[in-house]
């Protein structure tokens, strides 16, 4: 059974700091990972995806994938109060679009 | 606006009622999904449709009945629900289920409360 695990948090960081969100997975065959952001009462929205080992940067966001250690992380630089949300890690099942999600990590950025 | 529209946004129903959730996507996708999101639990994949054909039913109780009349529309028919079915129900779509690696786009969700 494929599993994706996240610490539910909350993770509290001050404004301007780097927020580091982590996700581990059980299936060594997992090829790709998606990070979704979900504001309270809203639906998940895609912010990053990563296929290859190493780092992928997009603006203030950096996704890091380490297949040997089976973890994927999301770094948010210069965190803003508007980044306060739940961040969901997900991986597709066996080359399909069927995503398996973690429980999400709640991030709180305080001024 | 993600291109996936769900109605109603909020629904309160009694355990003996019958109601339906509706989802419509304007993205030209061929795959549609129902997910359930309960507090402190991961999103649970309930049903998957690919080119109108149901490809997955993740052991969902029969009181939930999906319907996909075409690739743009998806329904979730609800009857004799239990209070533990109260949750956020999310519809999503993607280009096609088995190509892999496509982005899934979610609707805003339907908040269901069973009383």
Image: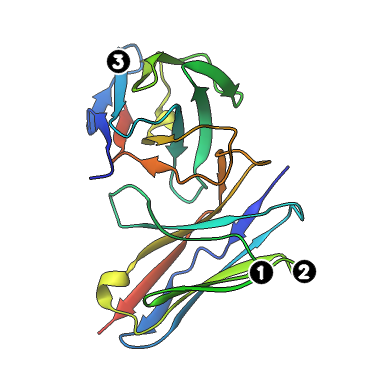
| On screen, residue B9 above or below B66 | below
Residue that numbered label 1 is attached to = A53
- Name the element at disc 2: loop
Q: Residue sitting at 44 percent across and 61 percent down?
A: A87
- Name the element at disc 3: strand
User: Going by the image, does A15 lie left or right of A104?
Assistant: left
Q: Which of the colour schemes (rainbow, by chain, secondary structure, one colour) is used? A: rainbow
Residue B77 position, x and y percent, is 37, 15
Q: Nearer the viewer, residue B27 or B1?
A: B27
Mark closest to the chain's N terminus, 1 or 2: 1
| On screen, residue B47 above or below A45 | above
Q: Nearer the viewer, mark 2 or mark 3?
A: 2
- Name the element at disc 1: loop
Residue that numbered label 3 is attached to = B19
**Crowdedness near tag 3: few (<14), some (14–19) or many (≥20) residues, C-alpha within 10 Å:** some
What distance separates the C-alpha of mark 1 from that of mark 2?
9 Å
Residue that numbered label 2 is attached to = A68
């Amino acid at each position: 059974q494929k599993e994706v695990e996240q610490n539910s948090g909350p993770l509290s960081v001050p404004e301007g700091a780097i927020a580091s969100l982590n996700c581990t997975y059980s299936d060594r065959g997992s090829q790709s990972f998606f990070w979704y952001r979900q504001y309270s009462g809203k639906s998940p929205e895609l912010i990053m995806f990563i296929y290859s080992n190493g780092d992928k940067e997009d603006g203030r966001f950096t996704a890091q994938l380490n297949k040997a250690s089976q973890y994927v992380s999301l770094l948010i630089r210069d965190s803003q109060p508007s980044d306060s949300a739940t961040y969901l890690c997900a991986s597709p099942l066996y080359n399909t679009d069927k995503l398996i999600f973690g429980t999400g990590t709640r991030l709180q950025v305080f001024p | 606006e993600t291109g996936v529209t769900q109605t109603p946004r909020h629904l309160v129903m009694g355990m003996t009622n019958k109601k339906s959730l509706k989802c419509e996507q304007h993205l030209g996708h061929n795959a549609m999904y129902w997910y359930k999101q309960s507090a402190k639990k991961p999103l649970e994949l309930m049903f998957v449709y690919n080119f109108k054909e149901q490809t997955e039913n993740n052991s969902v109780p029969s009181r939930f009945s999906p319907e996909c009349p075409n690739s743009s529309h998806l329904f979730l028919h609800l009857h004799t629900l239990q209070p533990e079915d109260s949750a956020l129900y999310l519809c999503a779509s993607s280009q096609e289920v088995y190509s892999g690696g496509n982005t899934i786009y979610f609707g805003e969700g339907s908040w269901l409360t069973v009383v």
